[in-house]
Amino acid sequence: MGINLQKGQRVDLTKGKADLNRIVVGLGWDPVGKSGGGGLLGGLFGGGSSNSNIDCDASVLMLKDGHLQDGKDVVYFGKLKSKCGSVQHSGDNLTGDGDGDDESVTVDLKAVPAAYDKLVFVVNIYNSVKRKQHFGLIQNAYIRVYEPSTGNELIRYNLSDNYSDLTTLVTGEIYRHNDEWKFGAIGDGTTDAKLGDVCKRFQK
């Protein structure tokens, strides 16, 4: 059984698991019912529209020395695989409907070049300003890590803060520490309208 984390907690991912190589980072969310209702992420306090589908997009920022140094180091629905091939995105989910992960990212930990020390997992709402949508219209959001070969879930972090009026979530990160990989539960929200704005936060 996996470890359930709270915001700010960090846990060893590979320590004592020499055979752990490929992992999948799954991200999931559900739209609040179109008739309204609160939802775990803060209800509809900030206004907004749930009349159209809410298109949440998961992305991975591959950092060197803690910073995003090249736009090519972003893996998202428009670029599904990293240049080095170690990070592979599952593709875009336009609605968030259905059970299980809405989007996922497969990471070959041993193939991540040594220059990269951190992978940051971000979810933002596509065209949020025009659609007047925010994460108060989303519920049951989570990030989890599991082994693809067995389906064994290692880590789960349920994002249960009030994210009303916020349009981007920095959900979690995988980072190197003393030649091992760790996972950190972040759960910070921002008002960034698009992925490029989020990326600027991680540049020098």
Image (cartoon, rainbow, N blue to C red):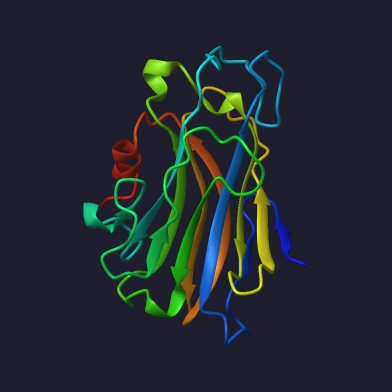
Answer above or below: position of 155 versus 163.
Answer: below
Residue 17 x %, y % = 62, 84
Answer above or below: position of 178 versus 130.
Answer: below
Residue 178 x %, y % = 48, 81
Quadrant in the rendering for residue 26: bottom right
Residue 37 placement, left or right of 76? right
Question: 169 or 10: nearer the eye?
Answer: 169
Residue 55 placement, left or right of 41? left
Quadrant in the rendering for residue 68: bottom left
Identify the residue at horizontal 69%, vertical 69% (top origin): 152
Question: 103 or 60: nearer the eye?
Answer: 103
Residue 190 x %, y % = 46, 34
Question: 77 or 186: nearer the eye?
Answer: 77
Identify the residue at horizontal 37%, vertical 70% (top origin): 86
Identify the residue at horizontal 66%, vertical 25% (top origin): 42
| Residue at the limit of the structure toward the right, as seen here | 1
Identify the residue at horizontal 42%, vertical 43% (top origin): 92
Q: How many marks?
A: 0
Residue 115 placement, left or right of 159? left
Question: 143 or 34: nearer the eye?
Answer: 34
Quadrant in the rendering for residue 155: bottom right
Residue 59 x %, y % = 41, 49
Name the quadrant of the N terminus: bottom right
Answer above or below: position of 53 versus 72.
Answer: above
